[in-house]
Image (cartoon, rainbow, N blue to C red):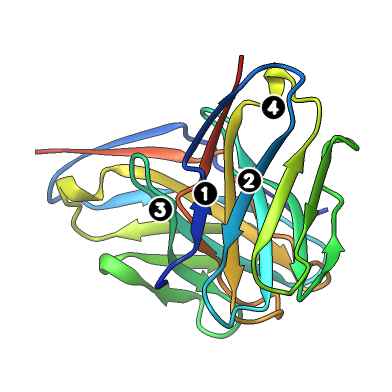
Amino acid sequence: GAGVSQTPSNKVTEKGKYVELRCDPISGHTALYWYRQSLGQGPEFLIYFQGTGAADDSGLPNDRFFAVRPEGSVSTLKIQRTERGDSAVYLCASSPTESNTGELFFGEGSRLTVL
Amino acid sequence: AQSVAQPEDQVNVAEGNPLTVKCTYSVSGNPYLFWYVQYPNRGLQFLLKYITGDNLVKGSYGFEAEFNKSQTSFHLKKPSALVSDSALYFCAVRDEYNNDMRFGAGTRLTVKP
């Protein structure tokens, strides 16, 4: 597709359940980022991939959060034992360059609501 | 670690007037600075960036931003605001050592007819 695609656009789950959020970056983009945006806040960095490997996962809040990018394209953010505080919009972004001078191209986000 | 501050939660201007949305930053080393805009229920869209060179950078939709190293600022400006400019604006920064981009809390711009 032309842009970054994220699915599902909305996910409602119950506390304690497992959730997967998918990101399909722009074709050919090597760098991929996950951010979390809570209401009234700016995007909060979670993890950054160069190719298949997580180059920086310092933003993951705890070990319930994990992300993979096995073939260097699509990425999945996985959240175990969800808590109400995990409710937020999860944003994915990609970049054609691994240089830190490049801008990011964002998807429209996956809104997660934990009841 | 790098960080940005957007001191104003909300900016209100009349259509046709100039607008400024403020941003200050903190980094180790040289800063790479970015502005993004977010419309309701949409993803963030890139407006412009400063990497090096001329301190005044021009971007999409008539926006520009001025890099001021001594004041560690990167304010977003537009000479004549449009009602359609009403949106949420985010300033972001990377430093030359880290690839993660850090965002401010955002400023809601409202342009009234």
> Going from the N terminus, do you reach mark 2 or mark 4 first?
2
Q: Secondary structure at mark 1?
A: strand
What residue do we see at 61% from left, 52% from top? A22
Q: Secondary structure at mark 2?
A: strand
> How many C-alpha atoms fall within 10 Å of the one at disc 4: few (<14), some, or many (≥20)?
some
Using the rendered image of the protein, determine whether residue A8 is visible from the camera's viewpoint: yes
Q: Amino acid at mark 2?
A: Leu
Structural distance between the alpha carbons of marks 1 and 4 = 17 Å
Using the rendered image of the protein, determine whether residue A42 is visible from the camera's viewpoint: no
Front: mark 3 or 2: 2
What residue do we see at 32% from left, 43% from top? B87
Given residues B68 and B100, the one toward you in this image is B100
User: Quadrant of the image for the C terminus of chain B?
Assistant: top left
Is A10 left or right of B83, judged from the image as shown?
right
Evaluate whether label 3 is on the same chain as label 1.
no
Q: Which residue is mark 3?
A: B37
Do the numbered discs 3 and 1 sit on residues whose CB atoms are within 8 Å?
Answer: no
- Which of the 4 quarters of the picture holds residue B53? bottom right
Evaluate whether label 3 is on the same chain as label 2.
no
Evaluate whether label 1 is on the same chain as label 4.
yes
Residue A86, numbered circle = 4
| Residue B14 drawn at (x, y percent) | 16, 40
Instruction: From this view, report whether residue A106 is shown above or below residue A9.
Output: below
Do the numbered discs 2 and 1 sit on residues whose CB atoms are within 8 Å?
Answer: yes
| Residue B84 drawn at (x, y percent) | 19, 49
Instruction: From this view, report whether residue B45 is shown above or below residue A80.
Output: below
| Residue B79 drawn at (x, y percent) | 23, 60
Residue A21, numbered circle = 2
| Residue A19 drawn at (x, y percent) | 69, 35
Structural distance between the alpha carbons of marks 4 and 3 = 24 Å
Label 2 marks which chain's residue?
A
Q: Amino acid at mark 4?
A: Asp
